[in-house]
Protein backbone atom coordinates (compact mmCIF):
# COMPACT_ATOMS: atom_id res chain seq x y z
CA UNK A 1 0.00 0.00 0.00
CA UNK A 2 1.44 3.35 -1.00
CA UNK A 3 0.95 6.09 1.56
CA UNK A 4 0.31 9.75 0.76
CA UNK A 5 2.94 11.46 2.85
CA UNK A 6 3.55 14.79 1.16
CA UNK A 7 0.62 16.62 -0.40
CA UNK A 8 2.09 19.28 -2.64
CA UNK A 9 1.56 21.74 -5.45
CA UNK A 10 4.72 20.93 -7.37
CA UNK A 11 2.82 20.03 -10.55
CA UNK A 12 0.97 23.36 -10.52
CA UNK A 13 4.17 25.38 -9.98
CA UNK A 14 6.01 23.35 -12.62
CA UNK A 15 3.32 23.93 -15.22
CA UNK A 16 3.09 27.64 -14.41
CA UNK A 17 6.78 27.97 -15.28
CA UNK A 18 6.54 25.79 -18.42
CA UNK A 19 8.86 23.13 -16.97
CA UNK A 20 8.43 19.55 -18.15
CA UNK A 21 8.40 16.51 -15.88
CA UNK A 22 11.61 15.33 -17.57
CA UNK A 23 13.34 18.64 -16.83
CA UNK A 24 12.36 18.36 -13.18
CA UNK A 25 13.52 14.73 -13.10
CA UNK A 26 16.90 15.72 -14.57
CA UNK A 27 17.21 18.59 -12.08
CA UNK A 28 16.62 16.27 -9.10
CA UNK A 29 18.54 13.34 -10.57
CA UNK A 30 15.58 10.95 -10.31
CA UNK A 31 13.45 8.98 -12.77
CA UNK A 32 10.34 10.24 -14.57
CA UNK A 33 8.33 7.69 -12.59
CA UNK A 34 9.65 9.16 -9.35
CA UNK A 35 8.49 12.65 -10.39
CA UNK A 36 5.00 11.31 -11.04
CA UNK A 37 4.91 9.79 -7.54
CA UNK A 38 6.30 12.97 -5.99
CA UNK A 39 3.68 15.17 -7.65
CA UNK A 40 0.90 12.82 -6.58
CA UNK A 41 2.17 12.84 -3.01
CA UNK A 42 3.19 9.18 -2.93
CA UNK A 43 6.90 9.75 -2.49
CA UNK A 44 8.73 11.83 0.09
CA UNK A 45 11.15 14.61 -0.78
CA UNK A 46 14.12 15.37 1.43
CA UNK A 47 14.98 18.92 2.43
CA UNK A 48 17.56 19.45 -0.30
CA UNK A 49 15.19 18.21 -3.00
CA UNK A 50 12.48 20.58 -1.79
CA UNK A 51 14.87 23.48 -2.10
CA UNK A 52 15.97 22.30 -5.56
CA UNK A 53 12.33 22.20 -6.72
CA UNK A 54 11.71 25.69 -5.35
CA UNK A 55 14.85 26.94 -7.10
CA UNK A 56 13.86 25.44 -10.47
CA UNK A 57 10.27 26.68 -10.28
CA UNK A 58 11.40 30.04 -8.87
CA UNK A 59 8.81 30.11 -6.11
CA UNK A 60 8.88 30.42 -2.32
CA UNK A 61 9.16 27.11 -0.51
CA UNK A 62 5.78 27.54 1.19
CA UNK A 63 4.03 27.70 -2.20
CA UNK A 64 4.87 24.01 -2.75
CA UNK A 65 2.66 22.94 0.17
CA UNK A 66 -1.06 22.29 0.03
CA UNK A 67 -2.88 24.71 2.31
CA UNK A 68 -6.15 26.57 2.63
CA UNK A 69 -4.75 29.79 1.21
CA UNK A 70 -3.53 28.61 -2.16
CA UNK A 71 -5.00 25.15 -2.77
CA UNK A 72 -8.16 24.04 -4.50
CA UNK A 73 -10.80 23.00 -1.96
CA UNK A 74 -11.27 19.68 -3.75
CA UNK A 75 -7.57 18.88 -3.29
CA UNK A 76 -7.79 19.63 0.42
CA UNK A 77 -10.97 17.59 0.85
CA UNK A 78 -9.52 14.68 -1.13
CA UNK A 79 -6.51 14.72 1.19
CA UNK A 80 -8.77 14.56 4.25
CA UNK A 81 -10.84 11.72 2.79
CA UNK A 82 -7.75 9.69 1.95
CA UNK A 83 -6.31 10.09 5.44
CA UNK A 84 -9.61 9.06 7.04
CA UNK A 85 -9.87 6.02 4.77
CA UNK A 86 -6.34 4.85 5.51
CA UNK A 87 -6.78 5.47 9.22
CA UNK A 88 -9.80 3.14 9.26
CA UNK A 89 -7.92 0.49 7.28
CA UNK A 90 -5.00 0.68 9.71
CA UNK A 91 -7.27 0.39 12.73
CA UNK A 92 -9.06 -2.69 11.41
CA UNK A 93 -5.74 -4.29 10.47
CA UNK A 94 -4.39 -3.94 14.00
CA UNK A 95 -1.52 -1.73 12.88
CA UNK A 96 -2.05 0.72 15.72
CA UNK A 97 -1.66 -2.08 18.26
CA UNK A 98 1.53 -3.31 16.60
CA UNK A 99 2.96 0.20 16.39
CA UNK A 100 2.20 0.93 20.04
CA UNK A 101 3.73 -2.39 21.10
CA UNK A 102 6.90 -1.68 19.11
CA UNK A 103 7.26 1.68 20.78
CA UNK A 104 6.68 0.12 24.22
CA UNK A 105 9.27 -2.61 23.61
CA UNK A 106 11.76 -0.14 22.14
CA UNK A 107 11.50 2.20 25.11
CA UNK A 108 11.70 -0.74 27.52
CA UNK A 109 15.05 -1.66 25.95
CA UNK A 110 16.33 1.91 25.95
CA UNK A 111 16.65 1.97 22.14
CA UNK A 112 16.25 5.00 19.90
CA UNK A 113 14.17 5.19 16.73
CA UNK A 114 17.40 5.35 14.72
CA UNK A 115 18.88 2.25 16.36
CA UNK A 116 15.79 0.12 15.71
CA UNK A 117 15.30 1.38 12.15
CA UNK A 118 18.94 0.69 11.24
CA UNK A 119 18.90 -2.77 12.84
CA UNK A 120 15.66 -3.56 10.98
CA UNK A 121 17.15 -2.38 7.63
CA UNK A 122 14.55 0.40 7.33
CA UNK A 123 14.71 4.12 6.82
CA UNK A 124 13.89 6.18 9.88
CA UNK A 125 10.73 7.60 8.26
CA UNK A 126 9.39 4.12 7.41
CA UNK A 127 9.97 2.80 10.91
CA UNK A 128 8.44 5.92 12.45
CA UNK A 129 5.25 5.44 10.40
CA UNK A 130 5.10 1.80 11.55
CA UNK A 131 5.32 2.88 15.19
CA UNK A 132 2.58 5.42 14.49
CA UNK A 133 0.38 2.60 13.17
CA UNK A 134 0.17 4.23 9.73
CA UNK A 135 2.02 1.69 7.58
CA UNK A 136 1.49 -1.97 6.79
CA UNK A 137 4.31 -4.42 7.53
CA UNK A 138 5.40 -7.28 5.27
CA UNK A 139 6.45 -10.68 6.63
CA UNK A 140 10.11 -9.87 5.94
CA UNK A 141 9.82 -6.49 7.67
CA UNK A 142 8.14 -8.16 10.66
CA UNK A 143 11.08 -10.57 10.95
CA UNK A 144 13.51 -7.67 10.76
CA UNK A 145 11.63 -5.77 13.47
CA UNK A 146 11.72 -8.79 15.75
CA UNK A 147 15.45 -9.16 15.18
CA UNK A 148 16.03 -5.46 15.90
CA UNK A 149 14.36 -5.98 19.29
CA UNK A 150 16.30 -9.20 19.95
CA UNK A 151 13.15 -11.31 19.64
CA UNK A 152 11.93 -14.08 17.40
CA UNK A 153 8.88 -13.29 15.23
CA UNK A 154 6.84 -15.68 17.39
CA UNK A 155 8.00 -13.99 20.60
CA UNK A 156 7.26 -10.54 19.17
CA UNK A 157 3.72 -11.68 18.33
CA UNK A 158 3.17 -13.02 21.85
CA UNK A 159 4.57 -9.80 23.37
CA UNK A 160 2.18 -7.68 21.29
CA UNK A 161 -0.76 -9.83 22.43
CA UNK A 162 0.38 -9.73 26.07
CA UNK A 163 0.77 -5.94 26.13
CA UNK A 164 -2.57 -5.44 24.40
CA UNK A 165 -4.44 -7.72 26.84
CA UNK A 166 -2.75 -6.01 29.80
CA UNK A 167 -4.04 -2.63 28.60
CA UNK A 168 -0.53 -1.18 28.38
CA UNK A 169 -0.94 0.15 24.84
CA UNK A 170 -4.04 2.33 25.13
CA UNK A 171 -2.20 5.50 26.16
CA UNK A 172 0.37 5.10 23.38
CA UNK A 173 -2.36 4.57 20.75
CA UNK A 174 -4.24 7.63 21.95
CA UNK A 175 -1.03 9.69 21.84
CA UNK A 176 -0.24 8.43 18.32
CA UNK A 177 -3.77 9.21 17.10
CA UNK A 178 -3.49 12.80 18.29
CA UNK A 179 -0.02 13.19 16.84
CA UNK A 180 -1.09 11.66 13.51
CA UNK A 181 -3.93 14.15 13.13
CA UNK A 182 -1.36 16.92 13.28
CA UNK A 183 1.07 15.24 10.88
CA UNK A 184 -1.73 14.37 8.43
CA UNK A 185 -2.99 17.95 8.20
CA UNK A 186 -1.77 19.95 5.18
CA UNK A 187 0.44 22.86 6.14
CA UNK A 188 -1.43 26.05 6.92
CA UNK A 189 -4.62 24.47 8.24
CA UNK A 190 -5.81 25.39 11.71
CA UNK A 191 -5.57 22.60 14.28
CA UNK A 192 -4.98 22.54 18.01
CA UNK A 193 -1.94 20.30 17.73
CA UNK A 194 -1.35 20.09 21.44
CA UNK A 195 -4.91 19.15 22.39
CA UNK A 196 -4.67 15.96 24.44
CA UNK A 197 -0.85 15.99 24.46
CA UNK A 198 1.51 16.90 27.22
CA UNK A 199 2.00 20.64 27.73
CA UNK A 200 4.24 22.09 24.99
CA UNK A 201 7.55 23.52 26.04
CA UNK A 202 9.54 26.40 24.63
CA UNK A 203 12.76 26.37 22.66
CA UNK A 204 15.31 29.16 22.49
CA UNK A 205 15.95 30.77 19.11
CA UNK A 206 19.48 32.01 18.42
CA UNK A 207 21.41 33.43 15.51
CA UNK A 208 22.64 36.75 14.18
CA UNK A 209 24.36 37.43 10.88
CA UNK A 210 28.13 36.97 10.77
CA UNK A 211 30.74 37.43 8.07
CA UNK A 212 30.49 35.65 4.70
CA UNK A 213 27.00 34.39 5.44
CA UNK A 214 27.99 32.66 8.68
CA UNK A 215 25.62 32.48 11.64
CA UNK A 216 26.73 33.56 15.10
CA UNK A 217 25.19 31.37 17.82
CA UNK A 218 25.35 32.63 21.40
CA UNK A 219 23.95 29.95 23.70
CA UNK A 220 24.59 32.22 26.70
CA UNK A 221 22.18 34.85 25.40
CA UNK A 222 19.56 35.14 28.15
CA UNK A 223 17.54 37.54 25.99
CA UNK A 224 17.11 35.01 23.18
CA UNK A 225 13.44 34.70 22.24
CA UNK A 226 11.49 31.55 22.92
CA UNK A 227 8.96 29.83 20.68
CA UNK A 228 6.75 26.78 21.12
CA UNK A 229 8.60 23.62 20.23
CA UNK A 230 7.47 21.73 17.10
CA UNK A 231 5.88 18.42 18.04
CA UNK A 232 8.75 16.37 16.57
CA UNK A 233 11.13 18.01 19.04
CA UNK A 234 8.96 17.78 22.15
CA UNK A 235 11.27 15.29 23.86
CA UNK A 236 14.62 16.55 22.57
CA UNK A 237 16.01 18.78 25.29
CA UNK A 238 19.09 19.78 23.28
CA UNK A 239 17.05 21.12 20.35
CA UNK A 240 17.04 24.83 19.53
CA UNK A 241 15.94 27.23 16.84
CA UNK A 242 18.01 29.41 14.52
CA UNK A 243 16.82 32.63 12.91
CA UNK A 244 17.12 32.86 9.16
CA UNK A 245 19.77 35.57 9.31
CA UNK A 246 21.81 34.63 6.24
CA UNK A 247 21.03 35.09 2.56
CA UNK A 248 23.30 32.18 1.72
CA UNK A 249 20.14 30.12 1.75
CA UNK A 250 18.85 32.35 -1.02
CA UNK A 251 15.38 33.89 -1.09
CA UNK A 252 13.50 30.61 -0.96
CA UNK A 253 12.60 31.02 2.70
CA UNK A 254 10.97 34.11 4.19
CA UNK A 255 12.96 36.22 6.64
CA UNK A 256 10.67 35.15 9.48
CA UNK A 257 11.55 31.46 8.98
CA UNK A 258 13.03 29.52 11.90
CA UNK A 259 15.16 26.43 11.36
CA UNK A 260 14.86 24.00 14.27
CA UNK A 261 18.00 22.01 14.95
CA UNK A 262 18.54 18.73 16.81
CA UNK A 263 22.19 17.97 17.76
CA UNK A 264 21.34 14.39 18.72
CA UNK A 265 19.88 13.35 15.35
CA UNK A 266 22.14 11.57 12.86
CA UNK A 267 22.98 13.63 9.79
CA UNK A 268 22.90 11.85 6.43
CA UNK A 269 22.97 12.62 2.70
CA UNK A 270 20.12 14.93 1.66
CA UNK A 271 19.87 16.67 5.03
CA UNK A 272 20.47 20.32 5.79
CA UNK A 273 22.69 20.80 8.82
CA UNK A 274 24.30 23.56 10.84
CA UNK A 275 28.07 23.07 10.73
CA UNK A 276 30.14 24.64 13.52
CA UNK A 277 33.47 26.12 12.45
CA UNK A 278 34.01 27.06 16.11
CA UNK A 279 31.98 27.11 19.33
CA UNK A 280 29.72 29.93 18.14
CA UNK A 281 30.31 30.38 14.39
CA UNK A 282 28.32 28.11 12.09
CA UNK A 283 27.02 27.77 8.54
CA UNK A 284 24.14 25.94 6.90
CA UNK A 285 25.25 23.07 4.67
CA UNK A 286 23.49 20.72 2.30
CA UNK A 287 24.98 17.30 3.04
CA UNK A 288 26.03 15.44 -0.09
CA UNK A 289 28.16 12.48 -1.13
CA UNK A 290 30.77 12.36 -3.89
CA UNK A 291 31.42 9.45 -6.26
CA UNK A 292 33.87 7.93 -3.77
CA UNK A 293 31.28 7.86 -1.01
CA UNK A 294 32.84 10.76 0.87
CA UNK A 295 30.47 13.17 2.59
CA UNK A 296 30.82 16.87 1.96
CA UNK A 297 28.80 19.99 2.60
CA UNK A 298 27.60 22.51 0.04
CA UNK A 299 26.92 26.15 0.81
CA UNK A 300 24.84 28.25 -1.55
CA UNK A 301 25.01 31.77 -3.01
CA UNK A 302 27.78 31.37 -4.05
CA UNK A 303 28.28 27.61 -4.15
CA UNK A 304 31.12 26.51 -1.90
CA UNK A 305 32.18 22.95 -1.08
CA UNK A 306 33.12 22.16 2.52
CA UNK A 307 35.18 18.99 3.01
CA UNK A 308 33.96 16.82 5.88
CA UNK A 309 35.75 14.06 7.77
CA UNK A 310 34.58 11.66 10.47
CA UNK A 311 35.92 14.13 13.04
CA UNK A 312 33.47 16.74 11.73
CA UNK A 313 30.31 14.69 12.39
CA UNK A 314 29.88 15.97 15.99
CA UNK A 315 30.04 19.50 14.56
CA UNK A 316 26.96 18.86 12.39
CA UNK A 317 23.57 19.63 13.94
CA UNK A 318 20.68 18.38 11.82
CA UNK A 319 17.90 20.76 10.73
CA UNK A 320 14.76 18.76 11.54
CA UNK A 321 11.92 21.25 11.10
CA UNK A 322 11.58 24.53 9.20
CA UNK A 323 8.71 26.85 10.11
CA UNK A 324 7.76 29.47 7.56
Image: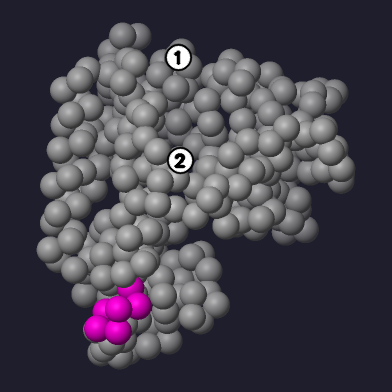
The local secondary structure at tag 1 comes to loop
> x, y percentage for residue 120?
40, 72
Label 2 SS: loop
Residue 42 in view, yes or no:
yes
Q: State which quarter of the image contains the N terminus.
A: bottom left
Give me the residue at 55% from left, 77% from top. 110
Residue bearing the label numbered 2: 46
- Taking the spot 44% from the left edge, 22% from the top edge, the residue there is 62
- The verdict on residue 213 being magenta is no
Please name the residue that numbered disc 1 is placed on.
Answer: 59
Q: Could you say where residue 160 lies in the image, as x and y percent from the top left? A: 28, 81
Q: Which residues are magenta?
A: 164-169
Q: CA distance from mark 1 to mark 2?
A: 17 Å
Left/right of residue 82 with respect to residue 184 in the rendered view: left
The residue lying at 42 percent from left, 79 percent from top is: 105
In the rendered view, tell whether residue 309 sits above or below residue 31.
below
Amino acid sequence: MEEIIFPNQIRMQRRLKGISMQELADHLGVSLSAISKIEKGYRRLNQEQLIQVAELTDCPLQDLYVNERNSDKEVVMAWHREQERRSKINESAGLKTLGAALRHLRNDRGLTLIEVSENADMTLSVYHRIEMGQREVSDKEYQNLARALSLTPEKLKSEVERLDKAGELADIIEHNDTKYKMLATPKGMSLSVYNGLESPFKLKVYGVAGKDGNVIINFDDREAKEVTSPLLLQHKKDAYGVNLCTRRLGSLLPNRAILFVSPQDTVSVGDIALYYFSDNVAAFLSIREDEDGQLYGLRWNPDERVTLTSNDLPKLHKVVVITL
